[in-house]
Amino acid sequence: MPLNIRTYHELTEADRSGLVDQIVAQRRRVADRLATVRRVVAVLSGKGGVGKSFVTAGLARALARSGRAAGVLDADFNGPTAPQLLHLPVTSCTLHDGVIEPLVSAEGVRCFSMAFLVEDGRPLAFRGPDTEAFVWRGALEAAALREFLADVAWGALDELLVDLPPGVQRFQELTELLPAPPAVLAVTIPTPESRDAVRRALRGAIDRKATPLGVVENMVGGPFAGSAADELAAEFGIPVLARVPFHPGEDVWENIVSKLGSSL
Amino acid sequence: MKFLCVECDRQMQFEERRLPGDGTLAAAFRCPTCGRVVALLTNPMETQLVASLGVKIGGTTLPPQPMEMVRGMVATGKPNAFQDEGERGAGSGTTWSVEAQERLARVPNFVRGMVKRIYLDYAKDRGIAEITPAVMDTARTELGLEGM
């Protein structure tokens, strides 16, 4: 007699594990937590060292100074720098009513970062078997991102800026976790090499239905030659929001807030 | 993950889970028609992968703890990273045996507050008056605390 092998979804009897329901509940927890966040903005470049965290912090501080409620989720788990850039003291996190309170800067920016949790000077390491760690480490970091979104009391925010690490993986995880695709702010330096990396990341973001807000060109006027921001802006039909010099004044960030104006 | 009893053409039902050691997760499934039982055994990497997804094979009766995965799985956490709020269940009269207290004291600070709360919730949920190492073992198995 031939075996009647069926597909996973054809087996529909009640299942005590309810693994799909557990995943759905995880997603619902994220959506519920972010229901009071007006917009999530992913700050990406696809390239390391262009100053995503620097731009994220500068923009978040300017948003707060302009009276908007801003938060920063530091999604660079292996190189978290948001607390330092926001001038936040690294103290213990407080649990309250089943959620964790974000730390709040003097200017009012709410922030959560792996820097609050991992011992100073040590890498983010997970418990688990030594072998084949590459298989599960990515899943653990995605789960950490989910918990940063769902278990931090972000409260009512106008903008939650997500400071992404280099590459596109964390952005993909973010879009899968969020109830709707995020807006995207691209950061580049002037060079053609950076332009090419950012182009790939931005194209990937648009493919995932993200809304590009514009591009910020960082480290302008220094040793890096090129016109990456103008070229990306022309190619994607987005504005150049700022050209940030090596030692910017506060006005640079306030100009970004002003330029984004109605979209914020 | 589902199991099909091919002979009966029935979806098998989750029966129980165990953590027999060596990082193995054992989940038993029974055919509701013929009663045949099969056990799925995962290797440590597979166990870790399941834990990293934040799901519990067999389900769970307790609500998720905030940052449960991060607190349970990060090995380089700061001992004083979290200031836990008052423990739910603390006023329920649940006590800890000396052995259980000693065992709890060996849990790293980073995760100890959450682990303690999970055991208290587990005991409260089941009307257990005293938490002992045996209760902790059972809870760990039932609740799928592979990473803790």
Image (spheres, helix red, strand yellow):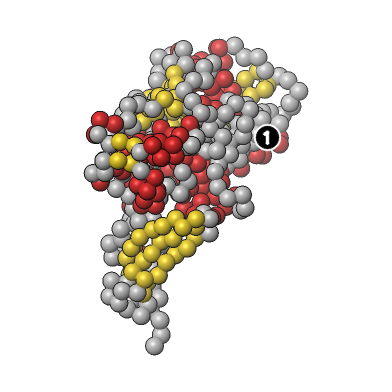
Is residue A221 visible in this depiction of the protein? yes
In this rendered view, identify the residue nearer to me: A47 or A186.
A47
Is B9 placed left or right of A191 in the picture? Answer: left
What residue lies at 59% left-to-right and 11% top-to-bottom?
Answer: A249
What residue lies at 53% left-to-right and 59% top-to-bottom?
Answer: B43
Q: Quadrant where the C terminus of chain A lies?
A: top left
Marks counted in the figure total 1
What residue lies at 45% left-to-right and 34% top-to-bottom?
Answer: B105
Identity of the residue furthest to the right in this view: A223
Amino acid type at image mark 1: Ser
What residue lies at 47% left-to-right and 16% top-to-bottom?
Answer: A105
- The subunit carrying tag 1 is A
Location of residue A81 (image quadrant) = top right
Q: Position of residue A120 (x, y in %)?
A: 60, 26
- Using the image, determine if residue A151 lies above or below residue B2: above
Q: Position of residue A50 (x, y in %)?
A: 65, 29
In this rendered view, identify the residue nearer to me: A251 or B16.
B16
Kind of element beneath mark 1: helix
Location of residue A65 (image quadrant) = top left
Identity of the residue furthest to the front in this view: B98
Identity of the residue furthest to the bottom in this view: A1
* Residue at the disc numbered 1: A194
- Count residues near mark 1 (Cα–Cα under 10 Å), then give few for <14, some for 14-19, many for 20+: many
Q: Quadrant where the N terminus of chain A lies?
A: bottom left
Is B27 placed left or right of B88 in the picture? Answer: right
In this rendered view, identify the residue nearer to me: A97 or A213.
A97
Is residue A163 visible in this depiction of the protein? no
Q: Position of residue A234 (x, y in %)?
A: 59, 34
